[in-house]
Image (cartoon, coloured by chain):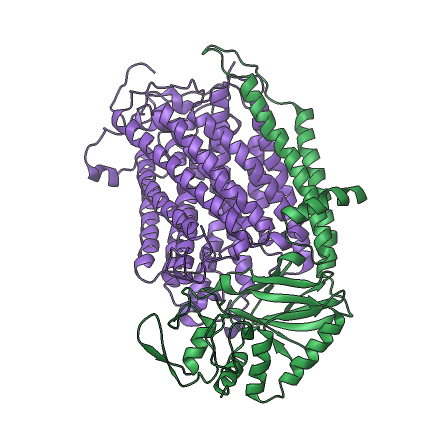
């Protein structure tokens, strides 16, 4: 390591313009970071608003009604879903942490196509701006799934939103392509595929999914536009189309997208668990290959979203069977992380709390996923709050926990400063408890039969909804602490050493923050990523 | 299995699930109870193990030495195969019940149910149309679903069944209700503004009552319109709050000789009692409150519970109260 031979990437070139034209992967990661954080704030406020509306049923005198009417609720619901999926969870880990650390972890100077990388950000921002613009044009109310024929008939700017999602999908494809080439071409000498850190493996598997699955979403959205704009009958039965066909197309993308959202999170968890228990990962090969396994099988499970959609019984049974198979590599990962803790040296700093929180919540998200994959049981649970609870346990309890944990873990590397451990832990306590208070009652609500996307509900669901809403406030407080921790760390954090956690992966073997070229000398790799001996 | 049923089913059904209205509901709950127990055990192993290790191997000093364990093939096979076996068991168990759900009995009573934004309408073989879905107990009933506009989903939580209604084609489901009573039918597929208000009642009655209901409903169809209104007035229990043969107020205002009058309302000014005012008062009782009556009004909204023709008949009946 030695003394710094150059300025850090943050100060290499001054001025705002240098940031918006930078080809450096680390600076582009920061650009994504600022954008995604903003969208997360917007999507989060919408979530709080939805929960507030559901605090009480709308009695005859409109007591308990916060949003103006069902339309207003449906719109906020749609934007919450679309923003969180397309603008927070999907780009979250790959575009921020992946961009920053994938090249560092394999000992590269940058991604393979730096110019394309910057372009991806601009394409993403174009799509995102268009999506935000629909909010001011005429708000869409289709839900993030755009199910036909409702999305063809509802009088709102669906086409604009669909174009936005199409453009953001483009950005996702470009980023994925960039990462795949980077992994194949730019690994440092000695960095074989099976010496790559598991975070890189996960981002790599995700990139493959992004490149293969996202075009299908693009095609589907184009077909939807053709139908809406030119009246070509594809999905609308009035024009001779088939509305269920849309669901097949949509989930053919969106189920792999679920893994686009969770695989990177699993990668982060592998890094956190090894670092904070000072232990080599248990079953490296199994974890690496299970990422690929999950990615491959995830293309053939889309029909489990459609058990009651009118698809045949045989189709339902086949999709149920294949879905069970995805459960296996997921279980393998969980057990491997558990085994990694065995005989480790475990600290409870904030990133590790998030990693353990992830395991806790993802275990619940996982087993409820199996429950939903059982055909006969899903008939009852489909489109109820049970599903809402399940995917929040996976997406928030899983992915978002990993984003937060990963973010604290790499904060010293990204910004060269330490964050305040106490407020970070306090933030975790509120988020973790608040999350369970918010979403666990929703499993029971779903079992009792409360359908999702309901602006109002029958009085017997009131109590559980109240508890859930109170939980959402705790989560809100938790994120306020998180925001405080980040701002405080940025403004007055202590200077970070190159490797504050004693981690073994390559990104920690250079300065904090790294110089523009990442490493003073090209690293030569002679061993695996987790050699804690 | 019998012991299982005894222990789990009852506990589950009363606390976490809606009342079991069919035999299939019971078999679904059995499987669900099994899944919950297995899930609980799995989570206990994973989460319990995690907490145990985290406590036991808590860092003692910065120089702790840790064991270097890269893998253990036997363990890895174990935790791949055991979950796989469990998954296959619940998959097969689910399939058996699902097959039962999807096999329409040949002898079923068929009812055509159509969803439209935002109400369900049931149509019986003899031409009776009804917003409430009335079925006989202990008899196979097949629902043929259609939609007039967008996707809907016919969901009866107490029967553990659900099926999407799709415009442009028919879908179906069946059940055999074993419990008398009223059950909720929800729309479970998002369909726009009043999706959450698209709720109807499914009434399970004895065969005798069902026949009686069906006959009287079909006779209603041939009655003069105001006479039909009188019937609906009775069946909807409007008379429990509104007088029709004298001007005295009950819980709500009397409807006797009301039509055409001017009523002063708490929202300010007076309102002429015409067809649209009565319609509004039935569908949205909170829109206007007659002076001297409680606000908010205790009257429930009948939005989504009356068909247009039923509404028209009620208004016609109220017009005739002279």
- Which quarter of the image is occupied by the N terminus of chain B? top right
| Chain A shade | purple
Question: Which residue is painted at 34% across and 38% down in the image?
Answer: A33
Percent x, y of residue A256: 53, 47
Residue closest to the eye, A162 or B52: B52
Name the residue furthest right: B2
The hue of chain B in the figure is green
Residue at left offset 54%, top offset 74%: B238
Seen at 47% across and 50% down, the residue is A214
Residue lying furthest left in this view?
A15
Q: Is residue B129 above or below residue A221?
A: below
Residue B123 at x, y percent in the picture: 63, 76
Where is residue A121 shown, x and y percent of the image? 33, 44
The percent coordinates of residue B249 (x first, y second) are 47, 75
- Nearer to us in this view, A15 or A152: A152
Left or right for A224, reference B53: left
Q: How many badges with numbers are in the image?
A: 0
Q: Residue drawn at (69%, 29%), measured in percent from left and top?
A: B78
């Amino acid at each position: 390591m030695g003394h710094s031979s150059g300025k850090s990437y943050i100060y290499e070139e001054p001025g705002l313009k240098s940031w918006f034209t930078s080809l450096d992967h680390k600076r582009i990661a920061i650009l994504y970071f600022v954008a995604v954080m903003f969208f997360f704030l917007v999507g989060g406020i919408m979530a709080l608003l939805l929960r507030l509306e559901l605090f009480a049923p709308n009695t005859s005198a409109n007591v308990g009604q916060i949003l103006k009417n069902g339309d207003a609720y449906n719109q906020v619901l749609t934007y919450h879903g679309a923003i969180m999926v397309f603008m927070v969870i999907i780009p979250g880990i790959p575009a921020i942490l992946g961009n920053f650390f994938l090249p560092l972890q394999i000992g590269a100077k940058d991604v393979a196509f730096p110019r394309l990388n910057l372009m991806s950000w601009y394409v993403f921002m174009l799509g995102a701006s268009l999506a935000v613009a629909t909010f001011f044009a005429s708000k869409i109310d289709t839900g993030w799934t755009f199910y036909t024929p409702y999305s063809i008939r509802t009088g709102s700017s669906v086409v604009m939103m669909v174009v936005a999602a199409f453009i953001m999908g483009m950005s996702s494809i470009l980023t994925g392509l960039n990462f795949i080439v980077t992994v194949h071409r730019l690994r440092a000498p000695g960095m074989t595929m099976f010496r790559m850190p598991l975070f890189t493996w996960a981002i790599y598997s995700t990139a493959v999914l992004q490149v293969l699955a996202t075009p299908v979403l693009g095609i589907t959205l184009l077909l939807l536009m053709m139908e809406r704009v030119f009246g070509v009958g594809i999905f609308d039965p009035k024009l001779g189309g088939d509305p269920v066909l849309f669901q097949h197309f949509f989930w053919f993308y969106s189920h792999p997208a679920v893994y686009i959202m969770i695989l990177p999170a699993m990668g982060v968890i592998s890094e956190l668990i090894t670092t904070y228990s000072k232990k080599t990962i248990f079953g490296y090969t199994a974890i690496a290959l299970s990422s690929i396994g999950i990615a491959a099988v995830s293309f053939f499970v889309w029909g489990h979203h459609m058990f009651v959609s009118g698809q045949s019984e045989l189709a339902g049974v086949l999709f149920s069977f294949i879905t069970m198979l995805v459960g296996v590599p997921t279980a393998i990962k969980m057990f491997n992380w558990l085994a990694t803790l065995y005989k480790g040296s475990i600290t409870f700093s904030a990133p590790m709390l998030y990693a353990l929180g992830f395991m806790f919540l993802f275990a619940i998200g996982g087993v409820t996923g199996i429950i939903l994959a059982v055909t006969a049981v899903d008939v009852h649970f489909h489109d109820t709050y049970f599903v809402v609870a399940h995917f929040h346990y996976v997406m928030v309890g899983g992915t978002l926990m990993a984003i937060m944990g990963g973010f604290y873990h790499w904060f010293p590397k990204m910004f060269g400063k330490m964050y305040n451990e106490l407020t970070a832990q306090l933030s975790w306590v509120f988020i973790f408890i608040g999350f369970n208070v918010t979403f666990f009652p929703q499993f029971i609500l779903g079992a009792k039969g409360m359908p999702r996307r309901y602006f109002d509900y029958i009085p017997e669901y009131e109590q559980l909804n109240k508890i859930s809403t109170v939980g959402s406030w705790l989560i809100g407080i938790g994120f306020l602490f998180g925001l405080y921790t980040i701002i405080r760390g940025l403004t007055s954090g202590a200077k970070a050493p190159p490797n504050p956690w004693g981690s073994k992966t390559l990104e920690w073997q250079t300065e904090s923050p790294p110089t523009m070229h990442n490493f003073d000398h090209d690293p030569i790799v002679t061993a695996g990523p987790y050699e804690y001996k | 299995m019998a012991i299982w049923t005894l222990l789990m089913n009852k506990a589950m059904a009363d606390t976490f699930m809606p009342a079991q209205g069919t035999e299939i509901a019971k078999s679904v709950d059995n499987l669900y109870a099994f899944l919950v127990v297995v899930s609980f055990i799995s989570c206990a192993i994973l989460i319990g193990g995690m907490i145990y290790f985290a406590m036991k191997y808590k860092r003692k000093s910065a120089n702790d030495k840790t064991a270097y364990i890269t893998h253990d093939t036997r363990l890895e096979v174990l935790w791949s195969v055991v979950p796989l076996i469990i998954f296959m068991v619940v998959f097969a168990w689910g399939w058996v019940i699902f097959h039962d759900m999807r096999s329409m009995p040949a002898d079923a009573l068929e009812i055509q149910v159509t969803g439209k934004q935002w109400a369900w309408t049931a149509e019986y073989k003899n031409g009776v149309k009804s917003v409430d879905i009335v079925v006989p107990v202990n008899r196979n009933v097949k629902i043929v679903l259609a939609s007039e506009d967008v996707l809907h989903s016919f969901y009866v939580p107490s029967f553990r069944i659900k099926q999407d209604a799709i415009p442009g084609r028919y879908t179906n489901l069946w059940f055999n209700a074993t419990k008398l009573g009223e059950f909720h039918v929800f729309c479970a597929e998002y369909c726009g503004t009043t999706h959450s208000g698209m709720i109807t009642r499914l009434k399970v009655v004895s065969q005798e009552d069902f026949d009686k209901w069906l006959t009287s409903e079909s006779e209603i169809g041939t009655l003069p319109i105001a006479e039909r209104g009188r019937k609906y007035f009775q069946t909807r229990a409007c008379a429990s709050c509104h007088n029709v043969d004298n001007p005295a107020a009950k819980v709500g205002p009397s409807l006797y000789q009301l039509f055409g009058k001017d009523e002063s309302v708490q929202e300010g000014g007076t309102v002429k009692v015409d067809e649209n005012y009565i319609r509004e008062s039935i569908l949205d009782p909170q829109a206007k409150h007659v002076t001297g009556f409680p606000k908010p009004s205790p009257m429930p909204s009948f939005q989504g519970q009356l068909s247009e023709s039923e509404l028209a008949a009620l208004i016609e009946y109220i017009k005739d109260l002279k």
